[in-house]
Image: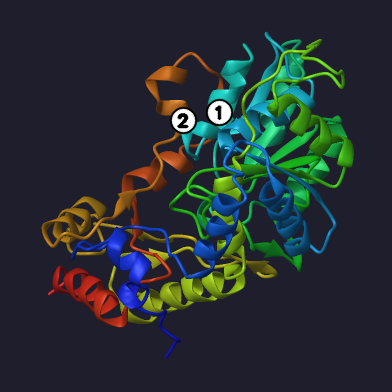
């Protein structure tokens, strides 16, 4: 039997935020340490987008990665992707390959720059970018006179993409990779952490992630020039002059000192939060995997998932007609939040004119998949309630 995480109401701060019986998909999980850092920020009057906790949070992130990367704390992960693409030289008219099965923030910054997304389908083993269709897309775009400028790879739901093969393909065609590790903080392949494979990587500290800064993200890279230039661009690209002088286009993308102070309190518990999420996945697996037509995404050999969200697939031909929609409706009736898997970006109206390569794997995942409540603060009673509702649908 796995160790079940502490109660959502075990902290008075969580109680004030979630004084409700609703079970959320992935709510923030606070502890008393945030108040210590926030109080320090307030007492020192550092509440602007500058301050010592920004530097401190960046050091905390770097320490989690064994100081093998350099971090730039930013206002959001979307901002980090935007700056990363700029650092990789993406310009208007360029093509950027992007995973189709992901949140839209992975692709929107491509269009911010006037570039064009080229979408690649998923593989069944990880649900992430298919190396086979990636190489097909590269060859076809090059045959059409458009060598892709960059590749955006995403680690969804905490499961790492097939980075060894993807990196080899990118190396063969000399195309840089932007690694979107927004959902995979702490995940790894053969001991190498997600966020350390590519030229530049991004993280998310949104309110629904394993740890949060209320909102925010980070750009990380083994190359200190990337992180330093990201900080420069994120601070309106102010030149080092004794007055406000600007020679480059900049952005207001720096994380605030208050947000960073929250992140510093959260990151102290990161390893514990990962273990709690994995325990929740294990509990769901033990209780539900026997149901006909219900399946989980298992870790391939050598992979370690942080299990940010526990996801299931439902085959109605084997489940007696139970579908992901039926499960979601049953949970919602009981004030429990769940969520469909991502609708492929290649199917979004915004991207209807963009090239796409694949065999419909992402579409199948969207049609049959569901994210279950996975917050690290879930109680055993709440988990039993969720499991009981799902099992009853098979009876």
Q: Is residue 51 visible?
A: yes
The image position of residue 378, as x and y in percent, is: 34, 72
Q: Residue at x 42, y 79 (%)?
A: 5
**Considering only vertical position in the picture, is 329 above or below 187?**
above
Looking at the rendered image, the quarter that the N terminus falls into is bottom left
The disc at residue 282 is none
Q: Tell me: 158 left or right of 23.
A: right
Residue beneath disc 2: 345
Within 10 Å of the Cα at label 1, are there few (<14), some (14-19), or many (20+) other Cα atoms? many
State whether residue 125 appears in this view.
Answer: no
Say which element carries label 1.
Answer: loop
In the orientation shown, which residue stands out farthest toward the bottom?
Answer: 1
Residue 358: x and y in percent read: 54, 34
Q: Nearer the viewer, residue 226 or 54?
A: 54
| Quadrant placement of the C terminus | bottom left
Q: Are marks 1 and 2 in contact (CB under 8 Å)?
A: yes
Query: How many numbered circles are shown?
Result: 2
Kind of element beneath mark 2: helix
Image position, residue 278 (x, y; %)? 50, 73
Q: Is residue 348 left or right of residue 131?
A: left
Residue 23 x, y percent position in the rendering: 25, 63
In this picture, residue 193 sits left or right of residue 378: right
Q: Which residue is mark 1?
A: 107
């Amino acid at each position: 039997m796995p160790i079940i995480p502490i109660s959502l109401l075990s902290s008075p701060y969580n109680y004030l935020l979630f004084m409700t019986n609703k079970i959320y998909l992935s709510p923030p999980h606070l502890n008393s340490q945030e108040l210590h850092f926030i109080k320090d920020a307030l007492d020192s009057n550092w509440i602007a987008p500058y301050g010592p906790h920004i530097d401190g949070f960046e050091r905390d992130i770097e320490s989690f990665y064994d100081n093998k990367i350099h971090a730039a704390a930013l206002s959001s992960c979307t901002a980090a992707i935007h700056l990363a693409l700029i650092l990789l030289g993406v310009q208007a008219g360029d093509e950027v390959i992007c995973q189709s099965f992901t949140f839209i923030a992975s692709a929107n910054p491509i269009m911010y720059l006037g570039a064009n997304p080229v979408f690649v389908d998923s593989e069944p083993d990880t649900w992430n970018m298919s190396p086979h269709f990636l190489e097909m897309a590269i060859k076809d775009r090059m045959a059409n006179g458009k060598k892709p400028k960059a590749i955006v790879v995403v680690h969804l739901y905490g499961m790492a993409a097939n980075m060894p093969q993807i990196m080899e393909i990118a190396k063969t065609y000399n195309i840089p990779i932007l690694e979107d590790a927004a959902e995979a903080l702490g995940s790894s392949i053969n001991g190498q952490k997600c966020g350390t494979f590519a030229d530049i990587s991004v993280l998310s500290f949104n309110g629904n992630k394993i740890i949060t800064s209320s909102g925010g993200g980070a750009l990380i890279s083994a190359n200190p020039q990337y992180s330093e230039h990201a900080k420069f661009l994120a601070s309106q690209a102010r030149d080092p002059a004794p007055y406000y002088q600007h020679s480059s286009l900049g952005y207001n993308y720096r994380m605030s000192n208050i947000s960073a102070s929250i992140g510093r309190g959260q990151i102290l518990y990161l390893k514990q939060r990962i273990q709690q999420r994995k325990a929740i996945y294990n509990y769901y697996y033990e209780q539900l995997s026997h149901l006909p037509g219900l399946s989980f995404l298992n870790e391939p050999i050598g992979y370690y998932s942080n299990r940010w969200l526990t996801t299931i697939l439902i085959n109605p031909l084997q489940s007696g007609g139970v579908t992901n929609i039926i499960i979601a409706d049953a949970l919602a009736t009981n004030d429990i939040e769940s969520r469909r898997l991502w609708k492929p970006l290649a199917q979004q109206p915004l991207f209807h004119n963009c090239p796409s390569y694949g065999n419909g794997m992402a579409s199948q995942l969207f049609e049959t998949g569901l994210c279950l409540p996975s917050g690290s603060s879930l109680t055993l009673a709440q988990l039993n309630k969720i499991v009981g509702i799902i099992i009853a649908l098979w009876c």
